[in-house]
Amino acid sequence: MLDGWLAAARPAAPALSFEGETLSYQDLATQVATRAEQLAAHGVQRGDRVAWYGLNHPEVFVLLFACARMGAMLLPLNWRLSDAEIDAIVADAEPRLVIHDAHFAAKAARFGAHLVGTLQGAAEACPQGREEDPLLLVYTSGSTGKPKGVVLTQVAVAANAAMSVAAHGLTAESRVLNVLPLFHVGGLNILPTPAFSVGAEVVLHQRFEPAQMAAALAEVTHAITVPTVLQAVLETPEWRAADLAGLRSLSIGSTDVPVELIEAVHARGVPVMQVYGATETCPFAIAQTVDDAMDTVGAIGRPAKGCSVRLVADDQDVPDGVPGEIWVKGPNILREYWRSPELTAAAISDGWFKTGDVAMRDADGIYWFADRIKHVIISGGENIYPAEIERVLRRVPGVAEVAVVGRADERWGEVPVAVVVGTADREALMTALRQGLARYKHPKDVVFVDALPRNAMGKVVTDQVRALAQKTCSASVQG
């Protein structure tokens, strides 16, 4: 299935640009065919895993298409993890081969790994992949426990690509930029694989560098980012100097995006498209489109084309305006959690993947993210969504970062506590809360810290924030 994308493209058209060099679609197809033969010569069969341990590199896509051709699975390893975490994933996934770049030669040596470009040999016959074969084994960040291996098939990746193409309006003339790490489905599948599916060009950066990305935006039609990356880009002189006339959209893969970031990009005439999903949805599920993004600031959009979405509470679908858990059904969702039938059964009900996220749908069918279910604070019988409080406090001058968590309370059961990075004073926080939120949603305390704890993916680790919230508070916003 995916192998056909390369054959369908114009052979001489640019497929992948990286560090000043460009591969045509013919070049890419040739490398893929060679790599498939080399993998087969090293014993890779249908269903086997091939791991990549390195920074962003064209080899990731060569391996992806080679695995698709032969029915194997690509396992992109998160190089930000500790050695112990990497070891646990490798032990769980049992890859047949590990291929690495020069940056990780020392660390990869313990796996008997092969340096990129050094594989040799050619098999007399390669296994033949099928569209229903699993293609990606991607481990979740494990912010609340042991990482889970998510199995995504060729069908899922192709379906996700079609959803992205429809939302972004990608064509063979598009040129898409990716600076996000390719060990995550956002980096792989929000723009790059969809671009390959229509014969467009992918511009790949080895890793994120703010000024480099800002300058590159003037040379592409679409790009993908996340809030922390975008914030850094907006602070560069290159952003202010860049001619963005050709940039059709800037996609942002996150559940909760500060509105001020979106508005800063919109001020330059570029739509910011929010893309909601999860590793388990490949990741497309709900998204704004390039045509409606500027009219629905702060929303996560509508269900992606070919994807069905329900909002469920107490096993019942909820009406418009009522929060419910996002359930997703479509060809893009995971086949299973790797070697975890119990987890799979708990997460998928009659084909519906339960995301664990809460959203509301308005009368126009537009979805608005509320929070993670496990983050919801129940105080005096009322549901309080931390993300709603964070959005208000984040706009206070002097607030660099904020996370809101629940803390046990004898009277109310739980109360919200804000953990803040920055220099904002009590009165500024109080004013914002009074103007923006009902009184029962106001944090009862504020803890000021130097930085929020984050995991290897850059996500805030909620359990550690809760521990910070137990400390003696630096200020109180009661009253």
Image (cartoon, rainbow, N blue to C red):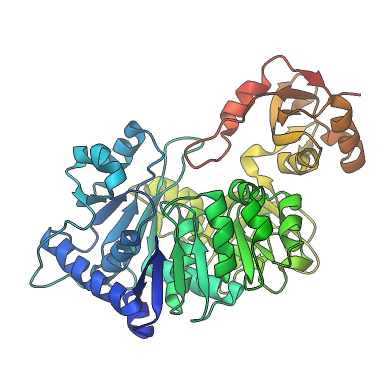
From this viewpoint, is residue 277 visible?
Answer: no
The residue at 16%/43% (across/down) is 112
The residue at 77%/39% (across/down) is 389
Residue nearest the viewer, comparing 44 with 100? 100
Residue nearest the viewer, comparing 144 with 176? 176
* Residue 197 sits above or below residue 355 on the image: below
Residue nearest the viewer, comparing 128 with 204? 204
Q: Is residue 327 left or right of residue 58?
A: right
Residue 78: image location, x then y, percent? 39, 45
Q: Is residue 128 left or right of residue 328?
A: left
The residue at 68%/57% (across/down) is 240
| Quadrant of the rendered image containing residue 244 | bottom right
* Residue 246 sits above or below residue 115 on the image: below
The residue at 41%/54% (across/down) is 206
From this viewpoint, is residue 221 visible?
Answer: yes
* Residue 165 sits above or below residue 276 on the image: below
Residue 199: image location, x then y, percent? 43, 79
Q: Furthest-left residue in view?
A: 124
